[in-house]
Image (cartoon, rainbow, N blue to C red):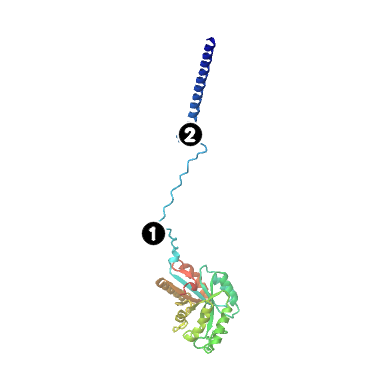
């Protein structure tokens, strides 16, 4: 019996230990489970403390709204000068005049055009000076005038004469062009016998067109067909409206200058031709500065159509 009591006591002890161990196990499981739950739920909690590695997204400025076509960026308004009427000044007969006067003429700080005679003592130097000082250069093509070969009627060497055959006329045009450096166009020197003749002017203008140059009809003859024929042949062309210095006295030059300004104001553009006389150069030194604000000075090539 004492042995049976001992076995019951041992059994009770074992059961007690088992219960204790079970309780301890359950407690540990609850603790560990709670920690696991806490770890899983942590991201869902709102953390009010800023984290060093969690930057707030930067707010981008709103994209500018596309402007409707009517409000699209418009080009800047042209300067007031660009709205002014245009005046093209052409100065003829460079080539035989001393380079000092050419330099003085071309020192005017406005655009204009010079027409240079071929085969003269200062032909190439005059064209070089004008080009270096920013002026447009044309060939001043010698042509037979009415009254040739009378006094004062000689157009110069290798001129376009009425009785020359077509091949010779064309050769002389090409030769004259090649004698003028920096040329971009052609106008006639004298030529009152040639410019009214469609056949001979046609030969001349075809050679001008072949080089892709423009033509200025100096209108030394009221019956000239040069401008109209140039248009028919597709040669860019313009014609003179005023001669500046038929009379070299300053009051007369001033009168013709004013006439050209008024024509430009009325019609939007005008071309005036003068000559490289000392009186003309001196007059231009007075007239050009006072005309700024009334007209915009341009090269002859800017008026061709």
**Residue 197 position in % (x across, y down):** 47, 86
Residue 119 image offset from top left, x and y in percent: 59, 81
The quarter of the picture where residue 270 lies is bottom left
Q: Is residue 191 visible?
A: no
Along the line of sight, which residue is nearer the eye, 214 or 64?
Answer: 64
Q: Is residue 71 left or right of residue 195?
A: left
For the residue carrying disc 1, how many other residues have a C-alpha within 10 Å: few (<14), some (14-19), or many (20+)?
A: few
Q: Residue furthest top?
A: 2
* Tag in front: 1 or 2: 2
Q: Secondary structure at mark 1?
A: helix
Q: Which percent across, then down, holds residue 207? A: 53, 81
- Residue 297 visible within the image: yes
> In the image, 184: left or right of 232?
right
CA gap, disc 1 and disc 2: 59 Å
Q: Compare residues 19 and 72 and report the one nearer the observer.
A: 19
- The tag on residue 40 is 2
In the image, residue 19 above or below residue 283: above
Q: Which mark is residue 70?
A: 1
Residue at 52% of width from left, 16% of height from top?
Answer: 11
149 over 177 or under it: above or below? below
Could you tell me which quadrant the C terminus lies in?
Answer: bottom left
Secondary structure beneath label 2: helix
Residue at 54% of width from left, 82% of height from top? 142
Per the rendering, the mark at residue 42 is none
Q: Is 26 located above or below residue 104 in the figure?
A: above
Residue that extends furthest to the front in the rendered view of this protein: 1
The tag earlier along the polypeptide, 1 or 2, is 2
Q: Position of residue 148 (x, y in %)?
A: 52, 88
**Label 2: how many Cα within 10 Å (few below 14, some 14–19, many 20+):** few
């Amino acid at each position: 019996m004492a042995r049976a009591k001992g076995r019951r006591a041992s059994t009770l002890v074992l059961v007690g230990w088992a219960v204790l161990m079970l309780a301890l196990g359950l407690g540990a499981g609850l603790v560990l489970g709670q920690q696991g739950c806490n770890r899983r739920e942590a991201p869902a909690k709102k953390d009010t403390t800023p984290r060093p590695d969690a930057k707030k997204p930067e707010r981008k400025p709103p994209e500018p709204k596309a402007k409707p076509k009517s409000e699209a960026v418009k080009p800047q308004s042209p300067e007031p000068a660009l709205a002014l009427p245009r005046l093209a000044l052409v100065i003829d007969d460079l080539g035989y005049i001393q380079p000092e006067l050419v330099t003085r003429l071309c020192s005017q700080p406005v655009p204009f055009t010079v027409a240079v005679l071929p085969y003269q003592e200062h032909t190439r130097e005059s064209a070089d000076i004008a080009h270096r000082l920013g002026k447009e250069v044309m060939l001043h093509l010698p042509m037979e005038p009415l009254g040739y070969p009378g006094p004062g009627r000689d157009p110069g060497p290798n001129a376009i004469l009425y009785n020359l055959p077509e091949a010779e006329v064309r050769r002389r045009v090409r030769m004259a062009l090649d004698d003028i450096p920096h040329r971009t166009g052609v106008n006639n020197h004298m030529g009152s016998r040639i410019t009214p003749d469609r056949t001979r002017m046609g030969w001349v203008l075809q050679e001008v067109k072949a080089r892709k140059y423009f033509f200025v009809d100096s209108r030394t003859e009221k019956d000239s067909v040069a401008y109209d024929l140039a248009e028919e042949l597709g040669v860019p062309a313009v014609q003179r409206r005023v001669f500046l210095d038929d009379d070299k006295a300053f009051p007369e030059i001033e009168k013709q200058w004013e006439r050209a300004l008024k024509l430009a104001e009325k019609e939007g553009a005008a071309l005036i031709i003068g000559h490289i006389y000392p009186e003309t150069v001196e007059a231009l030194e007075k007239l050009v500065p006072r005309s700024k604000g009334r007209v915009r000075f341009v090269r002859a090539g800017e008026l061709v159509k």
